Image (cartoon, coloured by chain):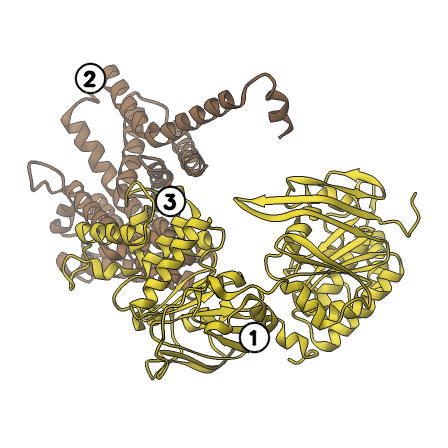
Chain colours: A brown, B yellow
Amino acid sequence: MNATLTKGKAVTGSEQIDRHSRRRVFLVMLSRYGTLVGLLAMIVVFSVRSPTTFLTLPNFLNILNQSSLTAIIAAGLTMTLVVGEFDLSIGYVASFSGLLVVGFIARDSLPVLLGVPIVLLIGAAIGTASGFLVTKVRINAVIATLGVGTILTGVGFAYSAFPIAAGVPPEFLQLSLGKPIFGIPNPIIIMIVVLAILWIILNRTDLGQKMQAVGGNIEAARLSGIRVDRVKMFAFATAGMCAALTGTLLSSLLGSGTLAAADGYLLDAFAAVFLGSATLRDGEFHIVGTLVGVLIIAVGFNGLSIFGAPTFFQPIFKGAILVLAVGLSTLARRYAKA
Amino acid sequence: MQSDSAAWLTVRGLSKQFGGAQALTAVDLDIHRGEVHGLVGANGAGKSTLIRCLAGVTMPDEGVVTVDGEEVRIAAPRDAEEKGLAFIHQELNLVPHFNAVQNMLLGAKKATRFGLIDWRRSRRMAAEAAERVGVQFSLDRRVDELSVAERWLVMIAKALVRDASMIAMDEPTASLSDHEAGQLFNIIRDLASDGVAILYVSHRLDEVLDLSDRITVFRDGKVTDREVRGGLDKRGLVRAIAGREVTAATRIDRGPIERDTPLFSAHNVAAGRMVKDVSFDVYRGEVLGLGGLVGAGRTEVARLAFGADKLDSGSFELEGKALPPRSIPAAVGAGIGLVPEERRSQGLMLEKSVGWNINVGVLKSLRTVPGLPFMSGAKSRSRSLALIDQLRIKTPGPNQVIGGLSGGNQQKALIARWLRPEMKVLFLDEPSRGVDIGARQEIHDAIRKLADDGVGTVVISSDVEELASLCDRVVVLSEGNVSGELIGDQITENKIIELSYAHIDQGGDE
C-alpha cells in the first residue's frame, strides 16, 4: 500500500494500471497456453534433434500406447477433482485390480469377457466405498482414500499368496497387444473410447453439469436441489473403475499380476491432471486438458530415453513436472479471478 | 493526561460509503472511561459499520478518531488493539481446541524466558484476568467444551489480558440464559467501575436501558439521538429507533388477494435456538414479507421450509398436504424454491456463465429426450435467453461469465434459476441486498410478476422500507416467535420495527 503511494509520484495511475493489466493478461495467456506451447516445443525440438528416431509413426504410436494407461487412470482422477475432491487410492486400486484380474482369469479360469467386467465393477465399488467415507462419514478425502488404498495393498498381498498355476490365456494378452484397426494398438483405442465417454458425461449430460456445479460452489449446488453426495460418489466410482481398467491393461501388458505394479500411476496421474487444468482453461479440471498433460509427460519421457538421459533424470523430470503443473494451475486460477 | 470526565475516545465526522450506499454519515461519538455506552438502531442503521471502523476492519472514508486526546489511525485490527480497544463479536473468535489460557494469550505478549514462552508466568497473567471476570471453571479446559456463557468470559478475560480500556460487545446476551445474562451484567458493571469503557450493542432494549450510562441511537447511518441514563423509556427508545412516521404511499396495491385456502403453511415450527414457535400461511399470488431483526429466525424458517435444515417440531403443509421431513431435492420437487441470502457464497458459481447459472437448477428438464441423460444445447440456450429477456438481466449474452455482472444482475439470474412452471412457493432471502436502486426496482417488479402468475412469494428483508413498499402482507418474527402480522394499509415501517422489538419489550418473555 505504502509502496504504491510513493511510486504514484513517478508513475501516473493509468500507466500503472496498464502495466498491471498487461502483466495479468500475459500471465493468463502463459497459464492457458503455456502447457500446449511446451508440448509443441518439446515435439519440435525432439524432431529436429532426432528426426530418424523420434519423428516416426511407430514412435508416435509407441508414445500414445504408453500414455494410454496413464490417460485412462488420470481421466478418472479428473472426475473426482471436478467435484472438488480427490482420490489417492487410484494407484493401489489399479495394482489390486491387476492382481485380481489375473487371479480370476488364470487361476479361476473365468473367461476374459466375464473376468474383466467383474474387476471393473469391483473397481467402481471400491471407488463408491471411498466416496461413501468422504461424503457420508465425512472423512477427509486424503485420509479416506489413503486408508482404502493401503488396505488394498494388504489385501493384494494376501490374494497373491495363492499360487497362480496356469499361465494367462492369449485372449487376455491380446487385450493390450492386439491391433485390430489400422494397426493401432488396443490400449489407444480403449483410451479414446474412455476419454470420449467421460468427456460426454462431463460436458453433455445433466450429471456432468451437476458435477461441475458441485465443484464450482458446493453450497450453491446443494441449494439448487442437487444431490451433492450422490454426485460425488459417482465421481469416485468412475475413478475407481478407470483405475481398475488401467490395472487390467497393465497386467495384460506384463502377462502376469505383479504386486504394486501400478502404484506409480498415482503421481503421473496427478501431474497430468494438474497440468491439464492449466491448459486452455483457468485452473478448471477437464478431460482434454488431462490428455494434454499425459502427453507432455509421455513425450518428455520418450525424449529423455531417446537422448539417453541417465535414469536418475526420470524422477527429477517427473517431480519437477508435478510442481510446475500445480504451480501453473494455481496461478491460472488466481489471475483469472482478479 | 486528561481528566476522567473528558471523553477518552472521540469520533468526529465519521463517514463511509459502500457502493452507492451511505452506511455512515458524519457520525460523532464520545466514550468516557468507566461508562457503559449503549448503541441501538435497526438493522443496517450503521452500528456495525461504526464498530468495524473502530476495530480496523473497515476503513472509513472520512472522519477523525482520537484516543486520550491524540489523533489515531486505525488501519488494521492490530492498531485497534494497541490503542486498548477490544471487540467481542457474536461469533466469538476463539480457537476451539485450545484451552482457555491459550485462547486468552493468543496473539498477546506472553511472558518469555530464554526466548521461549514461560507458560507458568503467562498462565498467572491469564489467571488474574480470569479472576476479575469471576471464572469458575478450570482454565485448562478446551474452549469447545465450555458453554457459550463461559466462552464470553474467556473473551472478556482475553481483552483484559491485553489491558483493554474499552470493550465493545455485540449482542452479548443473544444466546445466554436469563441467569447467565444477569451474571454478565454484574461483570460489566464491575469492569466499568474499574474504569473500563463498555460499548454495548444490543437489540434487547431493556438491557440497554438497564445497563447504559449513555445511549446513542442510530438511524440510516446517522446518529439521531443521544440520551443519558433515565432520559428515555422503552417506548421512547423504540420511537427513536423507528424515526418519523412514513406514509404507506409507496406501496403498490396489487388488488385484492383471495385468502380462503392457504397455499403453504407453517404450523408451530421449531428448530434449534433460533426458531421457537413460528406459524404462518402463504396464499397463492401474494407477496408475503417476513420481517424482524437479524437473528429473529427468518432465514432459518426459510431454510427449514426448503428442507435445508432439520425440524425439531412442527410441520409444513403445501396445498393441504403435509410435507414430510425431507431434503432439498424433495422440496424442489414439490415446487418450493429458495434464493439464498449470500449471493456469492450460496448462490452463484462465479466462474460459470450466466446461462449456466440460470439453468443449473432445472437440468433434467433441458434434456434432449426425457429418458436419456443428454443435455440439449438448444433448449438450454433458449431458456436462458428467454429469462435474460424476461428479467432484463444486463449481460452481453448467456455465455458471459456471471462473476463479471453487477450485483443486481447476478441476483436476477439467481431468481431466474427458479422460474419454472412447477414453482409454487419461492422464498427470497434479502433479494435486494447490495443492489443499486434501478436493479432493486426491477427485482421488485419480477417478484410481483411472479406473484401475479400465482406463485406464493415470501420475501425476507431487513430493509423495512422494502417490506413496506413491496409486500401485500407482512409477518414479523422476533426471537424465534411470530410477533405480529400486518395486512395492506397496516403495513408501515414503524409498525414493522415496533413488532420487531415486540417480544423483547415484554420484559424478557421467551
Among numbered discs 1 and 3, the one appearing first in the sequence: 3
Q: Nearer the viewer, residue A53 or B480?
A: B480
- Give the CA distance from mark 2 to mark 1: 78 Å
For the point 11% across and 50% down, the residue is A171
Looking at the picture, how far across and down is residue B435, in whole percent? 46, 50
Position above or below: B55 against A17? below
Name the residue that disc number 2 marks. Answer: A51
Secondary structure beneath disc 3? loop
Q: Nearer the viewer, residue B56 or A230?
A: B56
Q: On the same chain: label 3 and label 2?
A: no
Which quadrant holds residue A185?
top left
Rendered image: mark on residue B480: 1
Q: Quadrant of the N terminus of chain B?
A: top right
| Residue labelled with disc 3 | B351
Say whether mark 3 and mark 1 are on the same chain.
yes
Asked if marks 3 and 2 touch (Cβ < 8 Å), the reply is no
